Structures are given as C-alpha cells and as structure tokens.
Image: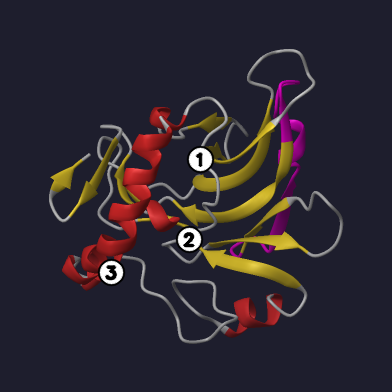
Amino acid sequence: MKKHYKLLYIISVSCFIMIIGNCKKDDVAQPCADPYCGCPGLTGEVKELSKYYYNPKVSKSQNKVAFLTHGGPKPPLNIWDKRTNQIQMIEISNKFQDSIQYGGIFDYSWCPYDESKLMLIIGTFTDTVGDKKKFCPGSNIYIFNLNDLELKKVTPIIFGEAGPEGISSIIWLNGSTQNNDSIILGYLGLYILQKQEFIYNNIII
C-alpha cells in the first residue's frame, strides 16, 4: 500500500502540469486572478461576502454560493441561495459515526451538472482497529447532497479506511456526468470516480 502511494505521489508531481495543459479551457474550472473570487463567476456580492467569510465558491448556474464561517474549531458549511437570499447552515461535524473524528473541511467543489451536490475534502481521524485508542489522520473525499443532507464517502479505496494524507484542494471538472465524474484531487492529479482510476498523460494507474 505504501509503495503504491509513493508511486502515485512521484508520478503526480511530474505529470500534474501536463494534465492541466492538455485539458481544453472549457473542461477545467479556471482559476480567477482575484484572491477573493469564488470561481466561477466573480461578482461584487461574492467579493463582499469574502470579507466576512472564507473560500466562497459559486455553483455553475451562479445561483448558489458555498462558504465557510470564520472562527471555531468546526465551522459549518453555509449555502447561500441568491434567488431567495436565504442562507442554509449545515453542521457537517455531526454526520460521522463514532469511529471517525471530524477534523474540518479543507476544500469543496460544486457538481457541474447538479447544483444540489458538493464534493468535499474533509480532514478525518479514523479508528481503523476499533479500540477507540488510535485514530489515523486522513484527507477523505465526500459527496454532500443538499436535498437529503446525506454525506457519502467516495475516497479511492486504494488508500484504505483512513484515507490519504495531505489532499487540500479539489476540482470537480466541467464535462463530468452522472456516469463519468472527473476530479482533480490535489497533488494526486486526475481521478475518474466511477472507475476508481487515476489517469496520468493517458496512462491508467
């Protein structure tokens, strides 16, 4: 397992830029020059929001904005519906079983084809033995459904129960579909969710 993990890390460092370079502009969520931008769709409202909250991100339709609040060890995830001007506050920390301790949300990305879904990177500490004495750290990937408030773990199974460490950014790529979700997972690179495959310059691992 460790040997495989190191191989992924080495390959991803050398190929990540190549992956982005080979993607068409419309296939990848483009970064904004403004550090206060919730990509895509920088607006004055979102920029103003970022003065009081952090990491605002706009859905593809630009109707919803996800953001986190400052302060506290476990800030909730907030969803602002711009059409109704209502903010939904979601406590993610209480959605885990006893064997998993919540460590906070590192990053998130809107689903490009269904704005009721977000993909989250969540820091976790997992009791992989069951004795509640040692909790292993990990950066796990979850899909959160805003309709039923369900949190579903989708971390690649090759990383085991605790998950990998050090993933702090995520992009749910445009062009994804319900049967073929393409994701950029931090330094690990391009990942196809349904196939449980990492792809580096057309090489499947």
Q: Separation of disc 1 and disc 2 at Cα?
A: 27 Å
Residue at 48% x, 66% y: name it. Answer: 62
Residue 17 is labelled as 3
Q: Separation of disc 1 and disc 3 at Cα?
A: 21 Å
Quadrant of res 197:
top left
Image location of residue 36, percent across then percent down: 60, 80
Range of residues picked out in magenta: 82-101
- Marked residue nearer the N-terminal end (1 or 3): 3
Tell me if I can see residue 25 in this picture.
Answer: yes
Q: Amino acid at mark 3?
A: Ile
79 horizontally vs 71: left or right: left
Residue on which the image places disc 1: 164
Residue that sits furthest to the front in the current view: 3
Q: Nearer the viewer, residue 66 or 132?
A: 132
Residue on which the image places disc 2: 59
Residue at 75% x, 38% y: name it. Answer: 93
Q: Residues within 10 Å of mark 1 (few under 14, many from 20)?
A: many
Q: Amino acid at mark 2?
A: Ser
> What is the secondary structure assignment of the residue under circle 2?
loop
Quadrant of res 107:
bottom right
Tag nearer the camera, 2 or 3: 3
Tell me if I can see residue 171 in this picture.
Answer: no
| Residue 12 located within the stretch drawn in magenta | no
Residue that sits furthest to the right in the current view: 72
Quadrant of res 112:
bottom left
Q: Residues within 10 Å of mark 3 (few under 14, many from 20)?
A: few
Residue at 80% x, 65% y: name it. Answer: 70
Q: Amino acid at mark 1?
A: Pro
Tag nearer the camera, 1 or 2: 1
